[in-house]
Amino acid sequence: MSSQSFEPLTLGVCSWSLQVTSIPELNRLLAELGVKATQIACGDPHHASWDEGDAMPQAALAADFAMTGAMLGFPGEDYTSPQIIKETGGFGPESLRAERIDRLKWALSRTKELGLTHLMLHAGFIPHPGDPGRPAFLDTLREAGRLAAEQGITLAFETGQEPADLLRQTLDELASPTLKVNFDPANMLLYDMGDPIRAVEILGPDIVSVHLKDARRPTTPGHWGEEVPLGQGEVDIPRFLDTLKAVGYAGPLMIEREVGDQAARIRDIGLGLDLVRDHLARTP
């Protein structure tokens, strides 16, 4: 039941957060959580592979849930530490760019098979202006945007691996109508890349999707921060939601939880859904 028409601020859950391996299992858990919407993993090492294999899109389209977009992770990405993901993430590694553009082509095709128009991914650590690697990196992002445009798909780069000002400058420089933002406030804390509230104000016009996740900043430079259940970290979820509305965001809100076993994640996601529902019900 893919759909591109949603109520403003539709609540849902990222499929990989539920650690599911099949569409029926995803369907059942979403129903138990009382939500209809999901952002679905294309089917890759980091965001779940599907028992259905190449038949996954057909199974997903026949399910009871609605999909807001798809998510791509690249084989070889390693989140052991911030430094290692900087070396292995997204389009960062020069030697893997051609291979990852091919993987993007596959993901764009799968996104179309799912009847969707939005594909989320991590671009990788964006080089700063003046970095000799920046022109080639931006050329790769331009190519990604061109390929997406050919398929009628919007690519949304997930926040966190760079400060908001750098992402803003990069999007302005690329000036591509198909390159947008999937905003994850917790990532900005986990990577220690600035204030997520201010980042919403900077990136607001280009935010097309949101991962609702919470975290605390690292206490030791170069280490990860700590992901925590929604409402228990340093994002300030009520203020974050209010800021999204203030910049005019009306897209989906997808709860993401990437720590704990399946039972713990389902519990935390359920509490997060209650928190967000309560706040949205109390605010105009």
Image (cartoon, rainbow, N blue to C red):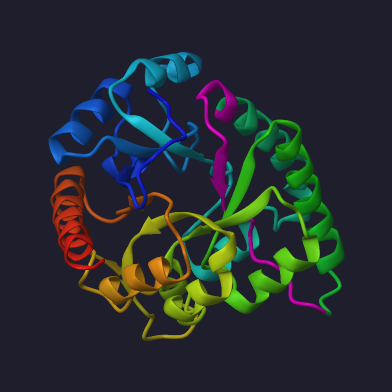
Say how many tags the image has: 0
Residue 205 sits in which quadrant? Answer: bottom right
x then y, percent, for residue 155: 63, 46
Compared across the picture, whether 201 is left or right of 167 comes to left
Quarter that holds the C terminus: bottom left
Residue 177 is one of the magenta-drawn residues: no
For image coordinates 44% across by 67% down, the residue present is: 187
Residue 250 picture quarter = bottom left
Task: Look at 36% across and 41% down and name the residue there.
Answer: 16
Does 208 appear above or below 113?
below
Is 175 on the left or on the right of 54, as rendered? right
Would residue 69 be found to the left or right of residue 24 on screen?
Answer: right
- Name the foreground residue: 117 vs 95: 117
Residue found farthest to the front: 284
Residue 186 visible, this orientation: no
Camera sees residue 148: yes
Give x and y (percent) for residue 8.
37, 50
Q: Quadrant of the N terminus?
A: top left
Within the image, what quadrant is residue 118 found in?
Answer: top right
Residue positioned 27% across, 41% down in the render: 18
Which residue is drawn at the image coordinates 26% and 72% (left, top)?
238
Magenta-colored segment: predominant secondary structure = loop
Q: Point out residue 200 in the picture as x, y percentages from the top left corner.
A: 49, 72
Q: Is 85 placed left or right of 66 in the picture?
A: right
> In the displayed structure, would residue 172 be above or below residue 192?
above
Chain part drawn in magenta: 111-129
Q: Is residue 124 magenta?
A: yes
Q: Position of residue 35 (x, y in %)?
A: 22, 39
Note whether 250 is above or below 58 in the view shown. Answer: below
Is residue 110 or residue 152 the one in the foreground? 152
**Foreground pick, 34 / 126:** 34
